[in-house]
Image (cartoon, rainbow, N blue to C red):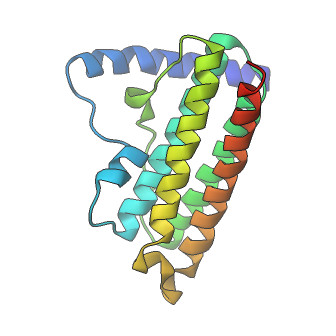
Amino acid sequence: MKRTVRVIALSLMAAVTLAVAGAASGDVGLYGNAAAKADDSLTIEDMLLYAAQDEYLARGEYVAIMGKFGTMRPFSNIMQAEETHLAWLKDAYADYKIAFPTDASSAHLHIPASLLEAYKTGVQAEIDNIAMYDRFLATALVQSAENKDLKVLFTNLRNASENHLRAFQNQLTKY
């Protein structure tokens, strides 16, 4: 397990180095919940894409944080949960016969300078994630009977983010 986390962390750190070069050239656009927030005409494909991007981003940031500060809870537990969330999304993509997107989150990672900042980053990331899923759940598309599977998926993802939010908030109470 620790070896796997280290391998993932090293891979992400290499990707971050490449992403920094891309960011310096202005090559970074909206991604995940930020893209969802800016999208005024959400489709099922859009919502699934933004959800996958946001879950990739969360996983990548938590892996990078552990690479910098060491493997610890709640980051290790939540990183594993993000893997589960991505698996749920992959199943939804298959159900809708859409190709699952590759992980392009490295260009959007924010690696905090301190553990305190990491917890604060986790809190904000989960707040933004919850808002995205609440927005998806409020759409007529997701509320329609034919898309009840998406309603269940986005509800489960939102509820998981609420649990993650509490875990990060609990860590902040220690400071």
> Looking at this rendering, what residue extends furthest in the left direction?
25
Find residue 81 and report its image quarter.
top right
Residue 133: image x %, image y %? Answer: 52, 59
Residue at point 48%, 76% (across, down)? 142
Disc count in the image? 0
Residue 35: image x %, image y %? Answer: 33, 48
Identify which residue, 23 or 172, lies in the foreground: 172
* The N terminus lies in quadrant: top right
Above or below: residue 151 compared with residue 20: below
Above or below: residue 145 compared with residue 120: below
Residue at point 52%, 88% (across, down)? 145
* The C terminus lies in quadrant: top right
Residue at point 47%, 15% (across, down)? 14
Whether residue 117 is visible: yes
Identify which residue, 133 or 50, lies in the foreground: 133
Residue 22: image x %, image y %? Answer: 27, 21
Residue 34: image x %, image y %? Answer: 37, 45
Whether residue 8 is visible: no
Find residue 119 and report its image quarter.
top right
> Looking at this rendering, what residue extends furthest in the bottom direction?
145
Q: Is residue 82 left or right of residue 132?
A: right
Residue at point 53%, 17% (across, down)? 112
Identify which residue, 113 or 107, lies in the foreground: 113
